[in-house]
Amino acid sequence: MPLRGEVWWARLDPVRGSEIGKTRLCVVLTSDILNERRRTLVVIPLSTSPKPNPPLLIPVRCAGRDAVAVTDQVRAISKE
């Protein structure tokens, strides 16, 4: 079960408009109790492309690499 603050791979396709897509690492935002009881998670996708630009693109370090949390792309996804 995903826990709040963990980083998991998530398939974000299909997308609409300018939503961030493809399979990418995401930070789990929802509380552990909701993660346990619900079929969805709320996540923030990570990207290695853009440069940090707070408050929308927050610098993070993930798996030894620099990345940004794309905070304007928060979304609910299925745990499937």
Image (cartoon, rainbow, N blue to C red):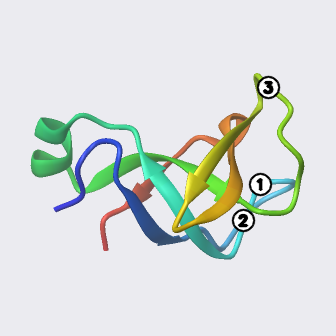
Callout 1 amino acid:
Glu
Residue ranking furthest to the front: 64
Secondary element at image label 3: loop
Callout 3 amino acid:
Pro
- Crowding at dot 1, Cα within 10 Å, few <14 / some 14-19 / many 20+, comes out as few
Residue at mark 3: 54
Secondary element at image label 2: loop
State the CA–CA distance, disc 3 to disc 1: 19 Å
State the CA–CA distance, disc 2 to disc 3: 24 Å
- Dividing the picture into quarters, in which one does residue 17 lie? bottom right
Residue 72 picture location, percent across and down:
72, 35
> Is the N terminus in the top left, top right, bottom left or bottom right quadrant?
bottom left
Residue at mark 1: 19
Residue at (70, 40) in percent of width and height:
59
Q: Nearer the viewer, mark 3 or mark 1?
A: 3
Query: Which mark, residue 15?
Result: 2
- Check contact, mark 2 vs mark 1: CB within 8 A: yes
Residue at (32, 37) in percent of width and height:
30
